Amino acid sequence: MTRTTNSVPEPVGADMLGLLKTLKLGALADTLPQRAALARQHKTSHLTFLQQLLADEVSRRESSSAARRSAKAGLDPRMRIDTWCAADDLLYDRPLLEDLTTLRFIDAGHSAILLGPVGVGKTHLANSLGHMAIGRRKTVLFARADKLFHRLKAARLDNSVDAELRRITAIDVLIIDDFALRALDATETNDFYELVVERHQQTKTTIVTSNREPAEWLTMTADALLAQSAIDRLTSRAHTLVIEGPSYRQRHRPG
């Protein structure tokens, strides 16, 4: 005699699939059979079963939304906190990093500066913080410094630079990667000043990665007075995480 078990998933019929699609819940068809089998096995009430289905859909939509917003923000989908490899030969303030990952600094309108030589994971950590901020429904923009300043220069060609500066200033979390990797010209120095001053006034969070300390940034700008004013504002409310050690490429060099 063949025995049937209540835990065996039943396929979703065409009529049910049609109803789900009409309600724009077609993705529930992926989890409905398993949920139904578990509900029978555990004698789950109808309301609890429905709640579990809706929770699945909410989770799926939130995940999908976060992925779209992360892509729009320019974040690398591979660079998340759970994929960051903290090698034993890296030296950094672990309690500070743990505190940064709580995002309390963003809630307080503070900023973060990630310093260290090339290849120690600064960009990875900045992306990770960006992904977590996206998860908190914050608006985020990740941009390499040279590309950010190039975007602002391009905006001057059609007289939209003021609008572009306002748009960037309004973003909750601005991540500037590889800042001061090369010298800033007069226009770039002025744009850096405008961004930092406006964001400071609006208590917006700026995350900067650099292989140079803020004291060295002055030598990389075209106007030391403007740069000093911007740097003072940025560092006055910033948490600075210094990472020391060999680069990722050196640690993984073939033997």
Image: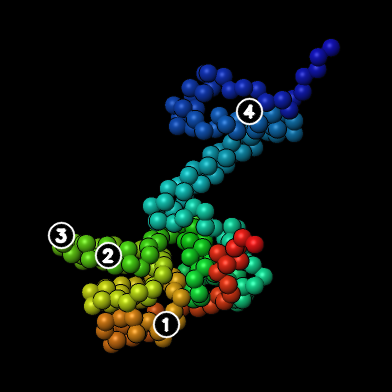
Q: Earlier in the sequence, mark 4 or mark 3?
A: 4
Q: Position of residue 182 (x, y in %)?
A: 35, 74
Find residue 152 and report its image quarter.
Answer: bottom left
Q: Amino acid at mark 2?
A: His
| Residue on which disc 4 sits | 33
Res 131 seen here: yes
| Residue on which disc 1 sits | 214
Q: Residue at x 53, y 18 (%)?
A: 14
Say whether marks 4 and 2 touch (CB < 8 Å). Answer: no
> Marks 1/3: CA distance?
33 Å
Numbered label attached to residue 158: 3
Find residue 174 and report its image quarter.
Answer: bottom left
Q: Earlier in the sequence, mark 4 or mark 2?
A: 4
Q: Position of residue 57 (x, y in %)?
A: 53, 39
* Along the viewing direction, whichever of 73 and 40 lies nearer the viewer: 73
Say whether marks 2 and 3 touch (CB < 8 Å). Answer: no
Q: Amino acid at mark 4?
A: Pro
Q: Earlier in the sequence, mark 1 or mark 4?
A: 4
* Residue 126 falls left or right of residue 216: right
* 2 vs 3, front mark: 2
* Along the viewing direction, whichever of 106 and 77 lies nearer the viewer: 77
Q: What secondary structure is found at the residue carrying circle 2?
A: helix
Q: Earlier in the sequence, mark 2 or mark 1?
A: 2
Q: What secondary structure is found at the residue carrying circle 4?
A: helix
Disc 1 crowd, CA 10 A, few/some/many (<14, 14-19, 20+): some
Q: Amino acid at mark 3?
A: Asp
Say whether marks 2 and 1 touch (CB < 8 Å). Answer: no
* 4 vs 2, front mark: 2
Q: State whether residue 155 is above or below residue 221.
A: above
> Marks 4/2: CA distance?
52 Å
* Along the viewing direction, whichever of 92 and 184 lies nearer the viewer: 184
| Residue on which disc 2 sits | 150
